[in-house]
Image: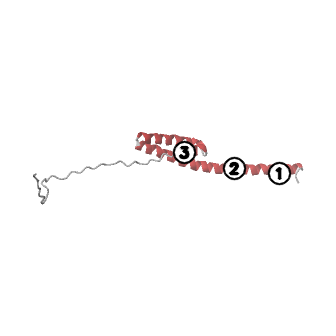
Amino acid sequence: MMQNKVDVRGAPLSTAPATTTVINVPVETVVPDHVVWSLFNTIFLNWFCLGFVAFVYSVKARDRKMVGDLTGAQNFASTARCLNIWALVLGLLLTIISIVLLGMAYAAAYGALLQAMQESGRYH
């Protein structure tokens, strides 16, 4: 039986540089679509239909995200967020103003009713 013996000494015989392969794994960019917030504004604070318009833009953002168009999804999501902010602020302000005006109207009506009853002599 013949055995081959190889002596390893020094640097490798090849002077070519070692090649490397770099694989870029795309990181999934999270684009919030604000669908839940838009749905809340549509159901509860839908003054001037801003909540519904925000909901439409949110659904468009979700559709663009599913297709893979992240730039379009970000644009629609940004518009939906802006509309949601306006819907929330206007909804809260107009709801508070409506409650205050309704309370003042009831107080004025109650005062007028008491005055009318006192003048007619039915209330002492």
Residue sitting nearer the eye, 104 or 4: 4
Question: x and y percent of residue 25 in the render?
Answer: 34, 48
- Which SS class for mark 3? helix
Where does label 1 land, which residue? 114
Q: Is residue 37 left or right of residue 73?
A: right
Per the model, the C-alpha gap separating discs 1 and 2 is: 20 Å
Per the model, the C-alpha gap separating discs 1 and 3 is: 45 Å
Where does label 2 land, which residue? 101
Q: Residue furthest right?
A: 121
Q: Residue furthest left?
A: 2
Where does label 3 land, which residue? 38
Looking at the image, is mark 1 or mark 2 earlier in the sequence? 2
Q: Is residue 23 left or right of residue 55?
A: left
Three-letter code, disc 3: Ser
Q: Tell me the crowding category of disc 2: few under 14, some 14 to 19, or many 20 or more residues within 10 angstroms, Cα based.
A: few
Three-letter code, disc 2: Leu
Looking at the image, is mark 1 or mark 3 earlier in the sequence? 3
Query: Height in image: 20 above or below 49?
Result: below
Per the model, the C-alpha gap separating discs 2 and 3 is: 27 Å
